[in-house]
Image (tube, coloured by chain):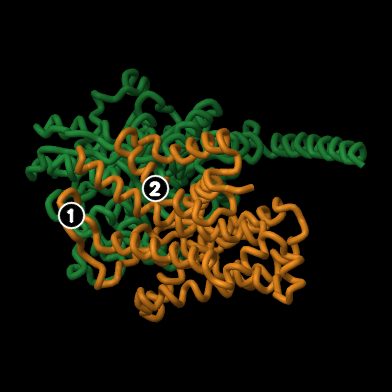
């Protein structure tokens, strides 16, 4: 039983890695742009899909896809922000939410139209195949890599925002954009770049996910609602909070699968309801 | 401003009501009142946007169109029409579409009907309206048992047929202890239940079962439980993307090295999604495989040209069902459900894809095939996935007549 428990916790951490990576980007976007980015799942899906497409068409290896795919999606994010979201900046955030939700539906339908809903196989790179016997479980090497990669990514993002000068500008833009603009910082451009980067992070998560799950147009829709719940629980706009919440909810979900598997999908929302009732600003939220 | 809006809303509503009434009247007028050779209109009601849209979906519409074209496109001097809709896997939406099609649009037969709950809902509407439904893509055995209908035929496969071939063979090969990973809804339970009976009858035992909701992306928890149970065989009582995901992840966790996997309902599109690397060696039961003989190959290639994938058993079943329906309507010289259904039961089902007959409980009795997924080395081209291990005769493949819970069986 302890072996089973330990393995479920580890598996929870793997799923938690994706929750953390995605909710991190979503939290940054909300913190800075005041937009609940429901297209985040669609960008995640595009990241995975581009990796698959490039492998099919040009034989582009996994490691290259890890860079190319987020780059392309990031540029797309820049375009979306500067041509569409920027126009909504003065309005209530329900408008941004509606726009990104619509975008997500359109992107998903397009991919579904061209590629169908069946999953596309994407094999892990040869270096990461096989697995390690940990005694209590057999850990596929690739999944170990996913935990490591996303933990590092989350840490780096957090350090950049909390410990660098660029990060201090970003935090200042959250507090008082007008004042920051007055100091000569081009705030609108900074917001556009932030959106592009966060979306690229989602695409990176997508490439990481491709060998674990199936590459399908529906993969974004499946995960976005969970990720949104993670952001809400962590506290909208709190970066460290969402990362911690992402990993821990993965573990909670994993443990629920041991006790009562049918409730695993539900448990995150139960936690969300409880947290919202107890501390409406979320576990780590300041507002 | 709000008052004006409300008034406009009211006007809109009135206009809509008038339109609806007018449409209903037009529908009534065009309905074959007494005329027995009215136009034939076939409804293909499937999942066109979600988990099952590749195994059925638009492909089923294409298959139905191919049947109409091969039949000649016309009957009783009028073109045969096909309408299609997406039921979104919601039984109430499906039932509403079926009602509208039957009452207003003069649809004479509905086919495809992916998703057990949807198929049962539409079969009930069809029974009530005395119209024909030919279910080609659902597994639940309830359609020919408790919920059987004099106007309903279950065409392609059911969970009994799927588990007989696969479970029986694996038990015979020494797979005595089983653990299930089961989809957490009617279909999964139904499938597991049927498999359990066959396994215990063959002297095997069931160690346990882990449930997973529909559209689970990560099966590692359930698979690890199955792994630690030490069962000889892990039975996957799920379908579509769920099966593909669980097979892929079982390979990833090294499960297939020590234990055997049995998938009960993988479609050829799922095998494509898993990749032969992951799926090789998998034993499964199917009603149709495109690469079995010249006629099926030719049909498969034609389908591939139009749809870009090789046909699944659902697509083949839909073609066969529509073809048999049209032949029966022609023989009966009528579009009346009663007359056509009688002919359908009298005539043998005979087309390039299926040979069989319709039993009193609505079961289309035909052979099933036990196949094994090829290794990447054995596969010579894309979609060259299966080798046929054996043919399961119809009498063995489907629920024995004596065990049927259908009221129509007892009468006959």
All told, the count of numbered labels is 2
Residue located 26% across and 65% down the image:
B384
Q: Position of residue B261 (x, y in %)?
A: 20, 49
Chain with colour green in the figure: B
Q: Earlier in the sequence, mark 1 or mark 2?
A: 1
Establish whether labels 1 and 2 are both on one chain: yes
Element assignment for label 2: helix
A4 to A72, vertically: above or below: above
Of all residues, the one furthest to the left in this rendering is B174
Alpha-carbon neighbours of circle 2 within 10 Å: few (<14), some, or many (≥20)? Answer: many
Q: Position of residue B96 (x, y in %)?
A: 59, 35
- Of residues B349 and B302, the one nearer the viewer is B302
Residue B368 visible? The answer is no
Chain with colour orange in the figure: A
Element assignment for label 1: loop
Q: In the drawing, does residue A17 fall left or right of residue A81?
A: left
Quadrant assignment, res A110: bottom right
Residue B79 visible? The answer is yes
- Of residues B153 and A109, the one nearer the viewer is A109
B153 to A138, vertically: above or below: above
Residue on which disc 2 sits? A250
Residue located 40% across and 47% down the image:
A248
Alpha-carbon neighbours of circle 1 within 10 Å: few (<14), some, or many (≥20)? Answer: few
- Of residues A217 and B227, the one nearer the viewer is B227
Q: Return the chain for callout 2.
A: A
Q: Return the chain for callout 1.
A: A
Residue on which disc 1 sits? A134
Residue located 49% across and 28% down the image:
B124
């Amino acid at each position: 039983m302890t072996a089973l428990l330990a393995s479920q916790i580890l598996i929870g951490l793997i799923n938690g890695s994706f929750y953390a990576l995605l909710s991190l980007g979503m939290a940054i976007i909300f913190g800075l742009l005041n937009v609940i980015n429901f297209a985040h799942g669609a960008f995640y899906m595009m990241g995975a899909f581009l990796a698959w497409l490039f492998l099919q068409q040009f034989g582009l290896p996994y490691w290259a896809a890890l860079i190319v795919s987020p780059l392309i999606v990031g540029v797309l994010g820049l375009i979306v922000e500067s041509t569409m979201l920027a126009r909504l900046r003065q309005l209530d955030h329900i408008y941004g939410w509606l726009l990104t939700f619509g975008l997500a539906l359109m992107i998903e339908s397009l991919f579904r139209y061209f590629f169908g809903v069946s999953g596309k196989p994407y094999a892990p790179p040869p270096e990461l195949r096989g697995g390690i016997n940990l005694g209590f479980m057999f850990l596929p090497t690739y999944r170990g890599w996913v935990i490591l990669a996303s933990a590092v990514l989350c840490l780096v993002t957090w350090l950049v925002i909390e410990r660098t000068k660029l990060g201090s500008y970003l935090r200042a833009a959250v507090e008082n954009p007008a004042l920051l603009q007055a100091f000569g910082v081009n705030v609108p451009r900074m917001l556009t770049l932030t959106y592009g980067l966060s979306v690229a992070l989602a695409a990176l998560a997508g490439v990481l996910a491709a060998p674990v799950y199936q590459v399908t147009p529906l993969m974004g829709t499946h995960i976005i609602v969970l990720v949104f719940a993670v952001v809400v629980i962590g506290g909208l706009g709190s970066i460290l909070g969402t990362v911690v919440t992402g990993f821990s909810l993965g573990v909670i979900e994993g443990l629920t699968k041991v006790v009562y598997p049918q409730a695993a999908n539900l448990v995150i929302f139960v936690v969300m309801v409880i947290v919202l009732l107890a501390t409406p600003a979320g576990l780590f939220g300041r507002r | 401003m709000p008052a004006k809006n409300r008034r406009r809303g009211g006007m809109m509503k009135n206009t809509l009501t008038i339109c609806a009434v007018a449409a209903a009247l037009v529908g009534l007028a065009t309905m074959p009142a007494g005329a027995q050779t009215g136009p034939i209109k076939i409804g293909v009601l499937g999942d066109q946007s979600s988990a099952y849209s590749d195994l059925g979906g638009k492909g089923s519409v294409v298959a139905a169109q191919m049947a109409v074209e091969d039949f000649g496109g016309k009957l009783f001097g009028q073109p045969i029409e096909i309408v299609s809709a997406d039921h979104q896997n919601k039984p109430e939406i499906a039932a509403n579409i079926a009602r509208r099609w039957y009452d207003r649009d003069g649809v004479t037969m509905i086919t495809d009907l992916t998703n057990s709950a949807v198929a049962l809902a539409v079969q009930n509407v069809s029974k009530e309206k005395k119209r024909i439904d030919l279910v080609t893509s659902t597994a639940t055995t309830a359609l020919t048992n408790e919920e059987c209908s004099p106007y309903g035929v279950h065409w392609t496969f059911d969970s009994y047929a799927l588990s007989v071939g696969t479970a029986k063979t694996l038990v015979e090969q020494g797979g005595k202890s089983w653990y299930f990973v089961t989809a957490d809804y009617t279909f999964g339970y139904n499938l597991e239940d049927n498999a359990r009976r066959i396994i215990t009858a063959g002297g095997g035992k069931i160690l346990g079962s882990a449930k997973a909701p529909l559209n689970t992306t990560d099966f590692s928890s359930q698979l690890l439980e199955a792994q630690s149970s030490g069962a000889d065989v892990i039975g996957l009582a799920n379908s579509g993307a769920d099966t593909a995901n669980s097979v892929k992840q079982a390979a990833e966790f090294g499960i297939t090295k020590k234990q055997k996997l049995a998938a009960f309902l993988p479609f050829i599109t799922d095998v494509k999604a898993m990749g032969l690397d992951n799926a090789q060696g998998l034993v499964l039961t199917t009603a149709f495989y495109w690469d079995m003989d010249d006629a099926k190959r030719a049909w498969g290639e034609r389908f591939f040209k139009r749809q870009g994938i090789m046909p699944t058993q659902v697509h083949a079943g839909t073609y066969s069902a529509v073809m048999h329906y049209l032949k029966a309507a022609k023989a009966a010289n009528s579009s009346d459900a009663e007359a056509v259904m009688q002919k359908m039961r009298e005539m043998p089902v005979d087309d390039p894809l299926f040979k069989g007959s319709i039993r009193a409980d609505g079961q289309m009795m035909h052979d099933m095939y036990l196949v094994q997924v090829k290794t990447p080395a054995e596969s010579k081209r894309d979609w060259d996935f299966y080798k046929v291990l054996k043919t399961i005769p119809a009498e063995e493949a489907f629920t024995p007549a004596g065990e049927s819970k259908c009221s129509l069986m007892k009468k006959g």
